[in-house]
Image: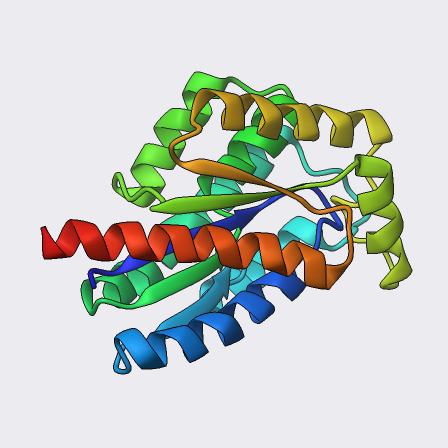
Amino acid sequence: MQGKLIVFEGVEGCGKTTQIQRSRDWLLARMTEIQPDVSIVVTREPGGTELGVGLRQLLLEERGQPMFERAELLLYAADRAQHVEQVLKPTLAKGGIVLCDRYTYSTIAYQGYGRGLSLSLIQQLNQIATGGLESDLTIWLDVDVEIGLSRAKARGKADRMEQAHLDFHRRVSQGYRELATAQPERIVRVNASPSEAIVQQQIQQILHNHLTQWHEQINN
């Protein structure tokens, strides 16, 4: 099977990290039967490279001075450009499956809908940073923002993004909703409100359907 980029998206506290790890375990077991030599790589944005780790600290750690919106946008773009070239493209070129915690839709939702920056500018920067690399599947974990923030804060100290005003997070959520409506062929919604096990069942069914479809396309 050709390499596939599977992205997990959603608001703070939607359960991406947990569900990515569960999905990796499920995929490892399933791919052992189908294609045992395939590699499954878990990564994230920001922070999927050595350079990205430093950028992630700049973006998410609370500092004395405010970070302006355009500076924030450009830092995310820099992280993505490094990540695409260093991790995503090489893995996909070898036929691997990448499970990525956030990608281009996060920037549209957070910096576009959330911060109010130009969507056309963000699209241009995403194009530059990715070189046109798009996800093969995006799983959107949809949860009410209040529930998500409550989960996030229960983990410990909130990061800079989690501390943003509730209205900001509501705009981000609306951004994901509009993106999913506009691109149903690429973004699949998952109800992330139930238990971790039930959410994972939904994801496994989606992954099963897409793996089957991808294999049929190759065989035809």
Residue 60 locus on image (x, y percent):
69, 52
Residue 11 locus on image (x, y percent):
69, 41
Residue nearest the observer in this picture, 94 or 50: 94
Q: Residue at x 78, y 57 (%)?
A: 195
Q: Residue at x 44, y 70 (%)?
A: 27
Q: Residue at x 85, y 63 (%)?
A: 155
Residue 23 locus on image (x, y percent):
53, 66
Residue 33 lies left or right of residue 114; in this view the side is left
Residue 150 lies left or right of residue 132; in this view the side is right
Q: Quadrant of residue 3?
A: bottom left
Q: Residue at x 26, y 59 (%)?
A: 89
Quadrant (top left, top right, bottom left, bottom right) of the N terminus? bottom left
In the picture shown, does residue 72 fall above or below 100? above
In the picture as drawn, the residue positioned furthest to the left comes out as 220
Q: How is the image coloured?
A: rainbow
Q: Quadrant of residue 140?
A: top right
